[in-house]
Image (cartoon, grey):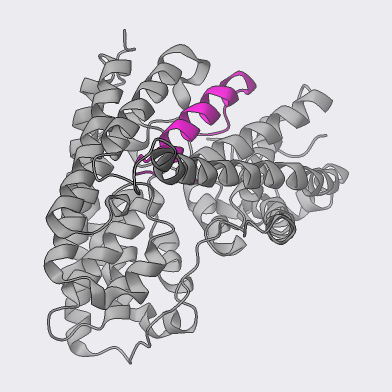
Amino acid sequence: MSAEPVGAPGAESPDPMKVVRTRGYLALLITVAILGVPISAAAFGFLALVHELQSLTYGDLPRALGFDGTPAWWPVPLLAVAGLLTGLTVRRLPGRGGHRPAESKVSTGPPAAAELPGITLAALASLGLGAVLGPEAPLIALGGGLAVYAVRLVTPGIDPGVRAMVAASGSFAAVSALLGSPLLGAFLLMEASGLAGMMLGVALVPGLLAAGVGSLIFTGLGSWTGLGTYSLTLPHVPPAGQPTFGEFGWAVVLGLAAALAGTGIKRLSLFLQERVERRTVVATAGMGVIVGLLALLYAGSTGEDASEVLYSGQDALGGLLSDNAAYSAGTLLVLIACKALAYCASLSSFRGGPVFPAMFLGAAGGLALSHLPGLSVTSGFAMGIGAMCVAMLKLPMTSVLLATLLLGSEGITVVPLVIVSVVVSYVLALRLERPAAAPHTAPR
């Protein structure tokens, strides 16, 4: 398989129409469509396994040990084991379990084939046992790595430009249904991968094709197995009125607050990451204990379930919005504080993605502010998600779409508010960002 290189740094951009007319491009489309089937099936299996591990370790295991339900202290030993397993995987296996989520990236390029087992095991130990991270980054890495590995078996001398498109397409297939829509995954990867410029359309088409195939596979497997699609959805969205001048003021406030909170989370997680990497196994287990203690603190001080602090928050978003009246402003503030600190600890040591916890924290912050005059529940929820996501990810278009498409028809109403909150958060977060640090020293 051959095609014109795409997006090579410093290279002259090829003619998009010339690339599209080549046989190599047609072969690429056929290849990614075929690869989309097994990769999306593998991604579905990964998500199903994570879900089963969460149910097994948090619900079934304590009952099997004779407890009447899950004790409030249960997350402490559970997260200690998660940290021990993750730390050993990071320390012993190639690839160090994938990229470090404290750097708030969802992708650092396709991993080598030898790194895939370590990425899988570290993600399963982290996500399945309660770390406050999401599955999107491991899925993107696994999808891209599997796609490149499969193509290299057939064509060892694959062109770097084609390799980038194949990797992106594999990642598209892996996250095709995770965010609720193939288009959301496409925008996330488009902004995160660096495939842009005149060749964006040429590079994006194979990914969209793979995402479409992957979404069909997710839907089919979810129906056939009865497990669902593990897609981000909100079962009930309260009506959103037309934006008011007061809500535009709240959009500025939410944007400023999210930028400050997101910058604080990133700085603390990077600070902790430096110390964790000095003693990877012991320190990761210690961070797991801290996450468990924060969950225990939340449960003890509010009477709510400790699991609301654990995990990515993807499954809890719907309940947070539909049952918002059950959460007092004080409960939401305690939840935000505990979840944010658990997020920092998880980012510094575990393996996973930063997207869903950022969405959850932003949503909770918006709901907390909606207890004040002039801000509706749905508007605060949407603006909080967009502002916090862009503060953590620096992906403005993806952040707007995450906050609006998720709400269905009500999302159209709040788009202007979300845009304002995202722009304010993005600009301030960029101004607060510290210069890139020097490359870290390999840990002992």
Residue placed at 36% from the left, 31% from the top?
Answer: 350
Q: Quadrant of residue 251?
A: bottom left
Give the image location of residue 438, x and y in percent.
27, 23
Give the image location of residue 103, x and y in percent.
33, 36
Image vertical order of residue 92 relative to residue 53, above or below: above
Residue placed at 52% from the left, 47% from the top?
Answer: 51
Q: Is residue 361 left or right of residue 313?
A: left
**94 or 74, which lies in front?**
74
Residue 112: in magenta span? yes
Residue ranking furthest to the top: 444
Residue placed at 58% from the left, 32% from the top?
Answer: 110
Give the image location of residue 279, x and y in percent.
26, 14
Q: Is residue 234 left or right of residue 343?
A: right
Give the image location of residue 93, x and y in percent.
50, 15
Q: Which part of the image, by quadrant, shows the N terminus?
A: top right
Q: Write down the region rendered in magenta.
A: 109-135
Q: Quadrant of residue 209?
A: bottom right
